[in-house]
Image (spheres, rainbow, N blue to C red):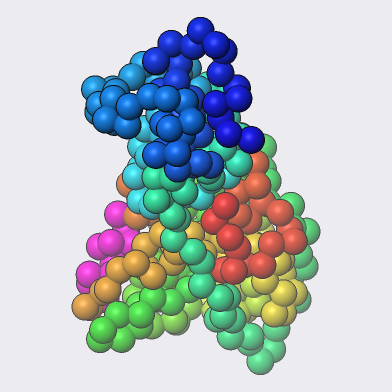
């Protein structure tokens, strides 16, 4: 039905221009100008001079600015669901669906994760430590439950390996170590850094997979000397250590896959900055659905919202 049928008989020229503007996605402007009997040049002049935006248009414009700011602050990594959470935390009433629509209009597209690859090297003689976490990646008090893992980063001159220690109460990386080898000293150095924070409680649980480094006597001695209790997931089951692997998913999606590292030294600097300046300063409270929280999520294939 032509838009002219929706006009009042006494409609003003401005009303007619408003109708043409609202319907321009459905009908050609030239035809609507003929139907409504207004000048095409007059309509275009009205568009050029500008018009008073509606309340809905003003809100969408404001939300687009807020969404763009949140997207830029995330380094282009947050998708619609995550940005919707950020806006709601600041008091905005907005749905992920609207955020997705406005992001598409603004051509904001978050970077995507890559397929998960297994990196755990199982030991020949596995330790008998039980799983004390049971996929419950929460803790009420800092320094009582930790998770750790090892991942790898490609550089132009070889691999760089990263070991981490994450506190389940704060979700911060409280210990980390990088080197060009995967020997047990890599994870012990990360554990030393975590212990140096002074937040670890006696009897604190440190959970890992059953990689060879975590089954070594050197690692067992490091736990004992710090009165920590070792915990291990099952062999080859990444969900048993999902939060630790989820950190690597975020690191690789948000930094590694978007950066070329000429040398391990370049990678070290960028990763240290990512951990301390970007990742550890996130506001984790109230961010439901963050990767690694759900036991059913698949390690490094976790989607970044």
Residue lying at 47% horizontally and 25% vertically, measured from the top left: 36
Q: Is residue 170 left or right of residue 188?
A: right
Residue 58 visible in the shown view: no
Is any part of residue 268 visible from this angle?
yes
Quadrant housing residue 141: top right
267 in the magenta segment: yes
**137 magenta-colored:** no
| Horizontal relation, residue 275 to residue 283: left or right | left
Look at 58% across and 60% down and name the residue there.
303
Q: From what the image shows, is residue 130 above or below residue 247?
A: below
Residue at the bottom extreme?
Answer: 124
Asked if 199 appears above or below 297 in the picture, the reply is above
Report whether 20 appears left or right of 160: right
Q: Which residue is depicted at the point 35% across and 80% down?
A: 154
* Numbered circles on residues, count: 0
Give residue 150's position: percent from left, percent from top. 50, 72
Q: Residue furthest top?
A: 10
Tell me residue 301's x, y (percent). Answer: 59, 69
Which contiguous range is marked in magenta?
264-273
Where residue 35 appears, as percent x and y from the top left, is: 48, 31
The x and y percentages for residue 200 are 54, 47
Please determine whether, in this image, residue 28 is positioned above or below residue 163: above
Left or right: residue 60 versus residue 156 is right
Query: Which secondary structure is most common in the magenta stretch?
Result: helix
Using the rendered view, name the quadrant where residue 159 is placed: bottom left
Closer to us: 30 or 110: 30
User: Foreground: 265 or 74?
Assistant: 74
Q: Residue at x 74, y 61 (%)?
A: 296
Q: Is residue 235 above or below residue 252?
A: below
Q: Quadrant of residue 236?
A: bottom right
Q: Quadrant of the N terminus?
A: top right
């Amino acid at each position: 039905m032509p838009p002219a049928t929706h006009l009042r008989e006494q409609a003003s020229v401005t009303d007619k221009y408003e109708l043409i503007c609202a319907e321009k996605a459905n009908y050609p402007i030239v035809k609507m100008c003929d139907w409504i009997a207004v000048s095409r040049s007059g309509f275009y002049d009205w568009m050029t001079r500008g018009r008073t935006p509606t309340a809905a248009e003003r809100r969408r414009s404001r939300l687009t600015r807020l969404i763009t700011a949140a997207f830029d602050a995330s380094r282009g990594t947050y998708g619609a669901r995550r940005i919707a959470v950020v806006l709601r935390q600041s008091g905005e009433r907005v749905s992920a669906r609207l955020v997705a629509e406005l992001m598409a209009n603004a051509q904001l597209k978050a970077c995507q994760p890559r397929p998960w690859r297994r990196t755990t090297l199982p030991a020949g003689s596995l330790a008998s430590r039980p799983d004390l976490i049971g996929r419950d990646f929460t803790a009420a008090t800092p320094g009582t439950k930790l998770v750790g893992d090892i991942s790898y980063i490609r550089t132009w001159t070889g691999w760089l390996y990263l070991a981490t220690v994450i506190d389940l109460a704060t979700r911060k990386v409280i210990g980390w170590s990088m080197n060009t080898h995967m020997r047990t000293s890599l994870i012990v150095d990360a554990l030393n850094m975590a212990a140096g924070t002074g937040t670890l409680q006696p009897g604190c649980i440190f959970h890992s997979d059953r990689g060879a480094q975590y089954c070594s006597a050197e690692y067992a001695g490091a736990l004992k000397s710090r009165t920590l209790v070792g915990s291990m997931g099952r062999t080859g089951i990444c969900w048993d250590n999902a939060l630790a692997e989820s950190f690597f998913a975020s690191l690789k999606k948000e930094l590694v896959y978007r950066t070329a590292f000429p040398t391990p030294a370049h990678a070290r600097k960028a990763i240290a900055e990512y951990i301390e300046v970007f990742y550890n300063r996130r506001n984790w409270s109230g961010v439901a659905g963050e990767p690694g929280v759900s036991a059913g999520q698949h390690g490094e294939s976790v989607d970044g919202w």
